[in-house]
Amino acid sequence: MRLPGYDLQMYDQTRIVDIDSVDSWPPLVLELIDRVIDSLVGDDWLRYPRDHFRTGDFEEEERLLREALSSHRLLAHHAARLLQHEIDDIQESSGLRVLTEDLRLAKVQSALEHYPELAALDPGGTKILSDGPNSWQGTAGGRIGTIDFVAPFSIFEHQTWGFWNLFDTWGGETLGWLKDGRESSELLMRLTEASKPVIVEFGARVATLNTYKMLLPAFVGSRGSADDYWGQWRTNESIPPDWVGELITPDSPRWPDGHVEVA
């Protein structure tokens, strides 16, 4: 069996679950999802599956789904813009780490060490560190202790704008933006020029995912070939290198050309 989109040699194939590959689902999950679909009336849910699974709906089915997946990992994708040494570190040593204030500082310090000619543009990176990760949050606190990801990979084939700006600015998730109307430091702009957009593919333990965002609609939508079933979740656990798969860049044949803006 070969699951689409990644090399099984990178993972324990008995524990990785791809929302878009029914063959990767445990039998209990397939049985549960089919039972939920049989209970739905009409076909409107195929166009708007998430509208039919609001918080409070299908609570027992969501619990059973997560229980059936409790020892499995979900095939996940983290969108970012990274410098080459960061790409190397993720694959070889650090894996993908949850966001902390110490990590924000280390990220800037490491960038200045690798690009010492830029250090005078923003001594210590103080301006970058004072910016928030998202223009609508204003501070880094909204993502502290987590890793944000989207799934399944087919989300990149659609005009889902929410994560696109993560490809536009180096350190965008933890630091600041270039395209939010604010003045950006020259250091941030130069580091953005030196970096590249990356989709980090990895396996996230389902037991570590946030519970305020349901998984059920994504599985139901995928099984029913719905119009819009992909989503965004968070894990509170760092990902070791063994569970990091491909780091997909614009040089990769898997890069979703034509769908994601490359700054």
Image (cartoon, helix red, strand yellow):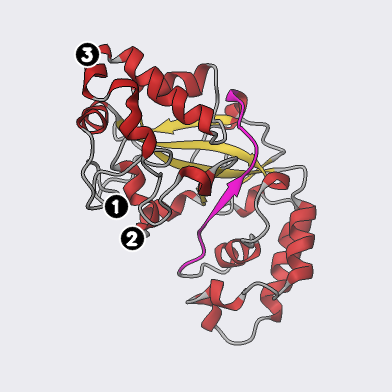
- Vertical side of 68 occupied by 48: above or below: below
Q: Is-magenta flag for residue 180? A: no
| Label 1, residues with CA under 10 Å away: few <14, some 14-19, many ≥20 | some
- Find residue 259 and name its label: 1
Residue 257 position, x and y percent, is 27, 45
The range drawn in magenta is 228-241
Residue 159's tag is 2
Dot 1: what SS?
A: loop
Q: Are the two marked residues, 1 and 2, in contact with CB atoms closer than 8 angstroms?
A: yes
Up the image or down, 262 lies above or below 84; here it is below
Identify residue type, mark 2. Gln
Quickly name the residue at label 3: 117
Mark 2 residue crowding within 10 angstroms, few (<14) / some (14–19) / many (20+): few
Mark 3: secondary structure: helix
Can you say which quadrant of the picture contains the C terminus?
A: top left
User: Which of the 4 image quarters holds residue 27?
Assistant: bottom right
Q: Which badge, 3 or 2, is on the more N-terminal residue?
A: 3
Question: Does residue 127 appear anywhere in the picture?
Answer: yes
Q: Position of residue 183 (x, y in %)?
A: 21, 44
Disc 3 to disc 2, C-alpha distance:
38 Å
At x 34% / y 29%, what residue is drawn?
126
**Camera-side residue: 81 or 11?**
81
How far across and down, in percent of the image, does residue 123 sit? 29, 21
